[in-house]
Image: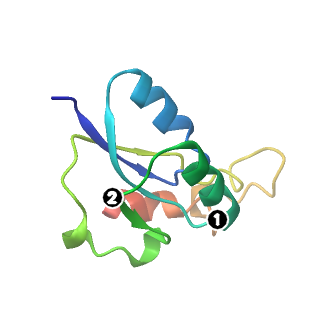
Amino acid sequence: MSLTFLDFFAGVGGFRCGLELAGFKCIGYCEKDKFARKSYEAMYDTKGEWFHDDITSIDQTQLPKADLWCAGSPCQNVSIAGKRAGLYGERSGLFFTFVDL
């Protein structure tokens, strides 16, 4: 039996790719960007997996049990290419939403 994981801020599946290569099994994902999600779903067999499109509206009691959670939270506010609002910026602040789950 392999270890399971949930993929938050899934993007196009970078964490998923690595974790599956390491023998983990993805049981669900969360991604708001419809274009990233379309790519993700084209590259991975997501049929039957838990899915949510907005981390801010997840009911934590509805999350499936997993051995590991991974999250590539938005980094625009911490990038030197951006306005450097930090972790409290609108996008990067979603990190705290993930931690609260």
Look at 58% across and 63% down and name the residue there: 88
Display coloring: rainbow
**Looking at the image, do the residues carrying marks 1 and 2 touch, with CB atoms under 8 Å apart?**
no
Q: Amino acid at mark 2?
A: Gly
Considering every residue shown, the one lying at the far right of the view is 81
Measured in 3D between alpha carbons, the distance from the residue under mark 1 to the one under mark 2, in whole angstroms, is 20 Å
* Foreground disc of the pair 1, 2: 2
| Residue that numbered label 1 is attached to | 33
Q: Quadrant of residue 43?
A: top right
Could you tell me which residue is drawn at 53 percent across and 61 percent down? 31
Q: Which residue is mark 2?
A: 48
Which SS class for mark 1?
A: loop
Q: Residue at x 34, y 56 (%)?
A: 49
User: Residue 44, percent across and down?
Assistant: 51, 44
Residue 36 x/y as whole percent: 66, 56
Describe residue 43's horizontal placement relative to residue 58 as left or right. Answer: right
Residue 11 visible in this rendered orientation of the protein = no
Displayed quadrant of residue 59: bottom left
Residue pushed farthest top? 22
**Which callout, 1 or 2, points at the residue further toward the start of the chain?**
1
On screen, residue 37 above or below 26: below
Assess disc 2: are there few (<14), some (14-19) or many (≥20) residues with their C-alpha within 10 Å of its C-alpha: few
| Residue type indicated by callout 1 | Asp
